[in-house]
Every structure is written in C-alpha cells, then in structure tokens.
Image (cartoon, coloured by chain):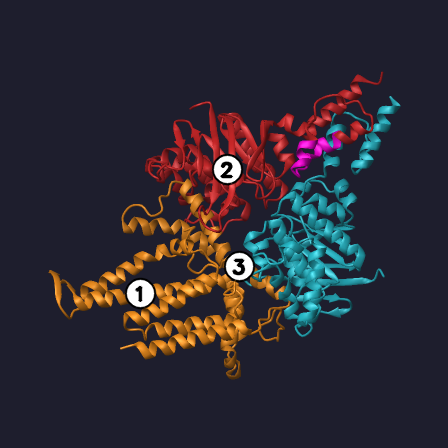
C-alpha cells in the first residue's frame, strides 16, 4: 500500500505584496500512511506550503497531485474532503455554538444526512474522549479540549490525510500528549497520512520523515534520527535537541566515551549502563 | 519592602450571587518570599491565573486578604490609589502581544511609565533601556508594533512592563506559542532579572522542564486550592504528589529515575535540569565501581 | 459587566427553553407590537401578567432577573425623565424654567416606563432561554420564504450564529486586554469625558486587531472544512413544533384580543 498519496512537482508561489518567492521550486512525494514533519523557522514557507496542499491558495507554477489527481479549481472541493486540517489557534476554527454543532459543521458542508451525522459525531466524540462535553459551549473548554474538538471535526470526515499546522503549540503538555496519542492511534488503524508543521521534538520523534524548509526551499529530506545527528544549529530552524541528545552532548563534552550519534532515551540508558559495568 | 507577599484565607467567586457563580479560589493561604523565584503549577482551570490577578487588584478577594508591602487588599479595597501597587507589581499576561495598541513601539513601551507619572524627559532613556533588556534594536522604536514579527511583538510587550520598573514580576505562561529559541530567550531574560536585579518572580507555567530549571519555590494548585508549597527540589522529589495532581516530571528527573531503575548508583538528590543530571553521571563515573 | 444578562443565554431545560426558536422569536416580536396597543392600566396589567407567567415558566429566578437588567435602569430613567419634563398637557403641578411636570406628562412617563420594562423583559427572556444557535436557526426559518427571491438566508443565518458564538470569546479577550492595560496604569471610566474616551483606545485597538485576526483565520478554517457559500448544506439541528408551541401561541393571541377589547 505504500504508493504516493501526495506528489509535489516543482511548485512555486509568491504573494502579491511580497518581493521574494515564498515557495521556491519544491518537489517531494509522500507515501500513504507516512507521518511527515515539516520544520523550519518562521517565514520559511511552511504554512504556505500547507495552504497550497489544501488548495486554499493557488500555485504560480508546478503541480500537486493527491491520489493521482492533480489539484485544480474544479476538483479542489472533492480533494479537500480527503484532507483534514487542524490549525494553531483553537479559537479561530470553532464555528459551532456547541461541541456537537461544531463537529457537525464539516458534515453539513458535505451534505451528510442528519442520521449519519448523529452516528458519526457519537463515534468521533468517543475517539477524542469528549463525549461528556457534547453540549458544551467553546468558551467553557480549555485550549486542549477545543483542539480535540477541532480534531474530532476533521476526523468525522474520515480524511486520508491529516495536516497539523502547529496544532499543539498553544496548548498545555497534557493536552498535547493527549492529541498526539489520538492521532497516532487513529493513523495506524486507518492508514491515515499525517503531515505536521511543528517545533516540538516529541512530535518530530513520532514521524517517519522530516522535511526542513528554509527561505521557501526544501533543504533537507531526512529521518528524525539523521536530523538530530547531522543538522548543525537546529535552533536556527526553530528546534531544540531531544532530551537524550542534549544529555549525551553534555556528557561527551565532559569526556565520557559515548558514540557520537543520535540515541533515544532507551539507547542512551543502555549505553551508559554498559559503559559503567565495563569499568 | 516587607519580606513576604501574604495570602490569608483567600476565597474568590466569579459572578458572585448569580446562577453563573463558581468558586475559583478556596481558602488560599500562601506566603511568597520577596526576592524569590516562585512558580505556580497545576492543571488548566485550577485557579492559577485568578490567583495572580489579585496581586494587581484586577480582582479582589471575595473573602480573606492579601498583603503586599504596605498594601492590604480585601473585598472592601476601593479602586482608588491602586497605582503605586500596580507600579510595584508588573503583570505579564498570556500572549502579552495582544495588549499592544500604539502607533509606534516607543509609544507602546512608554505607555505604562507615563501612566504612572514618569517624567516625559526620562522616557526616551527608559524605552531604550527596556529595548536593550529584551535585546531588540533601538531602531525598532519608530516602527508600528503591528508590522514586526510575532516573537518581536512579545518582546515589545514585555519591554512595556519592564519599563515600569516593577519590583515584583508576575508572568502567566510567557513562553507559550514561541519556538524553542524564543522560549529560551524569555526564560534567560527572566532569570537575569531575578539574579541581577533581585526581582521577585512569580511564574505560571505548564512546562515542568522550565519550572524545575529556574524556580526556587513551587506552588501546586488544584481546584482552586493551594495543595502544596515547597522548594522546587522537594516538590519534584515527590513523584506521588505530582502524579496525584496529574502533573508530569521534568525530563531530567524522568531520565534520572530510569537510570536508578537500572541500578546505576547516582545516589544524589534529583537533578533539576539536564546539566545537573550530566554532572551526576560524570561524578558516578569518576567515583568508579567498588 | 459580569452581572449584565441582557443578550446572554442561560442553559436550562424549562418549558420556555424548549419552545421552538422560530416561534419564540415571532411571539416576542408579536408581543412587542401589542405593547404599543396597550393604553390603560388594565391592558398593561394583562401584559405584565403574561411576562410574569413566561418568566415563571422559564424557571429563571426573579431576583437574578431583576439584578441582571439593573444596568439598563439608567437608560430607562433618562427616557422617563425626558417624557416627564417635556410632555405638556393637562394640569400643571410644577414648573421651573423650561421644565414642567404636568398630569399628562406623569401619565405618559408611567406608560413609557412600563413599555420599557415589558420590552426588556420579553427580549431578555428570549435570549436567556434561547441559545445563539437556536436564534439563528429561528431567524433562518422565519426568513426562509425569502430564499425564493434568491436572498442568501442560510449564509446570513450562519453569519449571525458565528457572530454570536464569538461574543464570549471577544468578551473574554476584552476583559484580559482591559486587565493588561489596567496593570499598566490605565483607569477605565475615570476622569472627564475626553479622558474616558481616550482611555478606551488601548482597549479598542487590540480588540479590533484581534477580531480581524479571528475572522481571517476562521474564514480559512471554514473553507478547509469544505464550506462554500454557493453549495447546498444539510442541517444537523432540527426543531419540531409541539403542543407547547401551539398553547403559547394561543395564550399570546388571546391576551392580544383582550387588549384590543379593553383598550380605550
């Protein structure tokens, strides 16, 4: 099943009021079921790239295909149905006056019947564990809960691709873990492709692949492990090292004989233990 | 300056005497030492933000009282003569860039000091000084606060509070929504103010790594009550306490615990940040096995 | 601010809450119209009786209701005083410069006061017992005949419901911006008029900036969720017209007949 669900070929994009290209000749493919993180500093073109993928802004040149269909103005609505987007600010994507009304919004747009809606809303509320908040108003929910509803509203349409635009950056760590767990589980079960713009290392660790953007160009297409190992100055790309990498960097600086490669926490513990037992 | 900020039996009800009423704070007793770096942690909705708003009399206790220096605040405190207190306590809210309004960065930073009666002739030097503190170029002064980047906007908003020269600085999740570099910058700035100017810092944060790295004291709030108040070291050594209130351990302690579980003899108090853990591991190796 | 209930919704499960929203809006407007037909104490008494029953059936506490509409009292008093001092006719009780209190002035001031109370009561009751979404549903239903002349009723209704949904968000935001500026030394509502108006700038500018940002991002989010104004949409919410709706309609109709009968 590992065919390409997204094919991006030589795309270019420039905003009318800008001098330079926001997206400069980018090409990449994404396979079905992959989890891809897109990283880069502010203004690197990440958010624009996502808007292009969802057909929210139009390309200047190049092409984007979803499942083999090239996006154009005619089929954009059909293609969009397969793509779920969760944005950064939970308040700015809440349309409904209550939780269930909000989840219904997308379903109403795609003309589901009322009976279908009731069933689907019930399912997705279970999925994000928000059943008891069904009748609540958005202003009564925490940021994390609002984001879970946004996710539910998107998953209700059973998308093939889920796109997260810094969706967890404004909510507390528990809220973040909660959302990531739901997505992780759901994407495994339904082979949903996940694309996430993020600054968060925990989120990057969940992904199979990382695309690094800088000034509108794709400068790295790599794995998280390789990224933590090879890319100097991660901070310049608005990232920080995972905890295990920070620790091993500190230990190596203080002359501990650790291998100079990225290790996750389990590996690092094993490594320290072995070294200690060898003494 | 008195030695402590004192909360005495403080209750607070939102929309008191209406059907919407709910209790946000219940019998809060707390003595925060002046000159300390104290963090307040707890789940969303536990009353943290309500508590710190009282430090500026933005809301008054429904019952009980608060003492800050010579000010005593209770339900009967009038809204007059609050300026000296508000000047003393600088409040930095969540997403402070939302409070920017003026035509220029200079005007926005000068807004607080002018309201508190600072001499117009001193304003320029104060604005420049604050911009230096938040490491923004002086040239940004004449730009509109709405045409600079999000990270810069946050720094301008913080500069606007620092320009008031507060003695106590209260921050409600100052790093949320920033990238790691921006987060580190803000935390280093706060740390510097605390160490170099001996500023009292009260910080609300959900990020345990930040709280453990920087704070001396930690308050845990739960359902409007203060359920624990101790040194950061003691709070974070008590895993069952944190679990009880759904709080996570800092990464350094999680890792430390795993090393201990693997029978590695670190035998020291729990490390509050990565370098401290690193030092403990290095010491363990230099002690050797015996 | 916090105690102000005009225009707010209070969730509940009373008979009044559960009336069909379209019908409830129509009845409220109907009521406001018949208020202007009342012209003696008996007819006003009938209308107050109707208000009282509605309020009782909504299970909203009387004290809370009165306290909630208190902020509007100033508006009422000013209007009543204008009426009192400036409507001429009848016996003159008191006269000073251009002010006169006359018997007719007294009566019309009393009527104005009662009309105000009635209209405020019924409209507050409407919003207290009807969720924003239900209100927009009701408006859509009422306006649906206009669809025939290609009036975008659905879009208008959605706009209203989104506007209402953002009221608490913007209220929260206004409070937090106000708090931030107060802690930067602003005294809202102190000093002379010019000063007061000036002190609003640090509140209004950020609030507008934020509202535009909300609108901008929300429109993108809506489009991403498949919304397009030209396309047909199905409806999740549905409201039936039940027995209670017919009974209340009858009640209001009967009272209005009585008013026409008893008026001078």
Local secondary structure at mark 1:
helix
Residue interval drawn in magenta: B240-256
Which circle marks residue C12 in the picture?
3
Is B83 part of what is drawn in magenta? no
In the rendered image, the vertical position of residue A229 relative to residue C80, given as above or below? above
Q: Position of residue B155 (x, y in %)?
A: 51, 41
Residue visible at 38% across and 67% down in the picture = C49
Near-viewer residue (B57 or A67):
B57
Q: Chain of mark 2?
A: B
Q: Position of residue A63 (x, y in %)?
A: 71, 66
The colour applied to the residues of chain B in this rendering is red
Chain letter matching colour cyan: A
Q: Is residue C147 left or right of residue C224?
A: left
In the rendered image, the vertical position of residue A122 relative to residue B231, given as above or below? below
Mark 1 vs mark 2, foreground winner is 1
In the rendered image, the vertical position of residue B152 relative to residue C238, given as above or below? above
Is B248 part of what is drawn in magenta? yes
Residue at the extreme bottom: C148
Q: Please say whether residue B143 is visible from this viewpoint.
A: no
Chain letter matching colour orange: C
Residue beneath disc 1: C114
Q: Chain of mark 3?
A: C
CA–CA distance in space, label 1 to label 2? 44 Å
Which circle marks residue B51 in the picture?
2
């Amino acid at each position: 099943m590992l065919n390409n669900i997204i094919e991006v070929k030589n795309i270019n994009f420039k905003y009318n009021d800008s001098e330079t290209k926001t997206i400069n000749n980018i090409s990449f493919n994404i396979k079905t079921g992959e989890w891809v993180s897109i990283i880069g500093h502010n203004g690197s073109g990440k958010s624009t790239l996502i808007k292009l993928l969802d057909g929210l802004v139009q390309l200047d040149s190049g092409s984007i295909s979803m499942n083999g269909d090239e996006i154009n103005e005619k089929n954009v609505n059909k293609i969009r149905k397969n793509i779920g987007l969760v944005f950064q600010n939970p308040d700015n994507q809440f349309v409904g006056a209550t939780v269930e009304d909000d989840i219904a919004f997308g379903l109403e747009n795609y003309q589901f019947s009322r009976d279908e809606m009731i069933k689907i809303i019930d399912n997705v509320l279970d999925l994000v564990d928000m059943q008891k908040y069904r009748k609540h108003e958005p202003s009564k929910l925490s940021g994390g809960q609002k984001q879970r509803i946004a996710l539910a509203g998107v998953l209700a349409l059973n998308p093939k691709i889920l796109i997260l635009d810094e969706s967890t950056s404004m909510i507390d760590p528990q809220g973040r873990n909660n959302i990531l767990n739901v997505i992780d589980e759901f994407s495994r079960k339904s082979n949903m492709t996940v694309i996430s713009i993020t600054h968060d290392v925990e989120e990057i660790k969940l992904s199979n692949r990382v695309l690094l953007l800088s000034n509108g160009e794709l400068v790295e297409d790599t794995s998280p492990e390789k990224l933590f190992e090879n890319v100097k100055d991660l901070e310049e790309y608005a990232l920080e090292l995972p905890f295990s990498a920070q620790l091993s960097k500190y230990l190596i600086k203080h002359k501990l004989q650790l291998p100079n490669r990225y290790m996750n926490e389990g590996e690092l513990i094993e490594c320290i233990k072995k070294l200690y037992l060898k003494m | 300056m008195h030695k402590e900020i004192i909360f005495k039996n403080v209750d607070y009800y939102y929309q008191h005497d209406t059907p919407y009423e709910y209790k946000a704070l219940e019998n809060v007793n707390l003595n925060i030492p002046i000159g300390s770096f104290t963090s307040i942690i707890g789940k969303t909705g536990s009353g943290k933000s309500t508590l710190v708003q009282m430090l500026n009399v933005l809301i008054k206790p429904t019952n009980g009282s608060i003492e800050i220096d010579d000010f005593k605040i209770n339900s009967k405190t009038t809204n007059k003569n609050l300026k000296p207190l508000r000047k003393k306590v600088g409040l930095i809210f969540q997403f402070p860039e939302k409070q920017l309004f003026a035509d220029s960065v200079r005007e926005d930073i000068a807004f607080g000091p002018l309201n508190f009666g600072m001499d117009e002739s001193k304003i320029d030097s104060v604005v420049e000084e604050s911009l230096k503190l938040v490491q923004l170029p002086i040239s940004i002064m004449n730009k509109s606060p709405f045409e600079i980047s999000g990270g810069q906007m946050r720094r301008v908003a913080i500069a606007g509070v620092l320009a008031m020269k507060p003695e106590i600085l209260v921050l409600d999740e100052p790093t949320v929504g920033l990238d790691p570099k921006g987060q580190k910058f803000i935390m280093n700035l706060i740390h510097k103010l605390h160490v170099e100017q001996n500023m009292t810092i009260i910080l609300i944060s959900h990020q345990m790594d930040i709280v453990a790295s920087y704070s001396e004291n930690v308050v845990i709030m739960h359902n409007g009550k203060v359920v624990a108040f101790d040194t950061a070291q003691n709070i974070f050594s008590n895993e069952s306490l944190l679990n009880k209130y759904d709080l996570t351990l800092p990464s350094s302690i999680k890792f430390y615990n795993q090393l201990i579980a693997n029978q590695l003899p670190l035998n020291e108090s729990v490390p509050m940040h990565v370098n401290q853990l690193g030092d403990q591991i290095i010491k363990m190796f230099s002690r050797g096995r015996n | 601010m916090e105690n102000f209930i005009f225009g707010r919704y209070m969730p509940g499960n009373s008979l009044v809450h559960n009336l069909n929203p379209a019908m409830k809006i129509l009845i409220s407007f109907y009521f406001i119209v018949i208020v202007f037909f009342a012209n003696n104490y008996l007819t006003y008494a009938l209308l107050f009786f109707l208000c009282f029953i509605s309020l009782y059936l909504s299970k909203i506490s009387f004290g809370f209701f009165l306290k909630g509409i208190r902020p509007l009292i100033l508006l009422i008093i000013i209007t009543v005083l204008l009426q009192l001092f400036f409507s001429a006719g009848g016996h003159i009780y008191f006269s000073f410069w251009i002010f006169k209190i006359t018997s007719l002035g007294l009566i019309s001031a009393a009527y104005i006061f009662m009309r105000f109370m009635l209209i405020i009561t019924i409209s507050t009751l409407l919003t207290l017992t009807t969720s924003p979404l239900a209100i927009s549903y009701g408006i859509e239903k009422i306006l649906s005949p206009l669809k025939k002349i290609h009036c975008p009723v659905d879009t208008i209704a959605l706009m209203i419901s989104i506007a209402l949904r953002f009221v608490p968000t913007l209220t929260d935001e206004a409070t937090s911006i106000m708090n931030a500026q107060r802690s930067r030394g602003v005294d809202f509502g102190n000093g002379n008029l010019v000063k007061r108006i000036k002190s609003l700038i640090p509140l209004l500018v950020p609030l507008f900036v934020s509202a535009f940002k909300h609108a901008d991002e929300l429109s993108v989010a809506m489009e991403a969720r498949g919304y397009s104004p030209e396309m047909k949409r199905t409806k999740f919410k549905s409201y039936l017209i039940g027995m209670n709706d017919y009974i209340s309609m009858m009640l209001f109709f009967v009272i209005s007949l009585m008013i026409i009968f008893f008026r001078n």
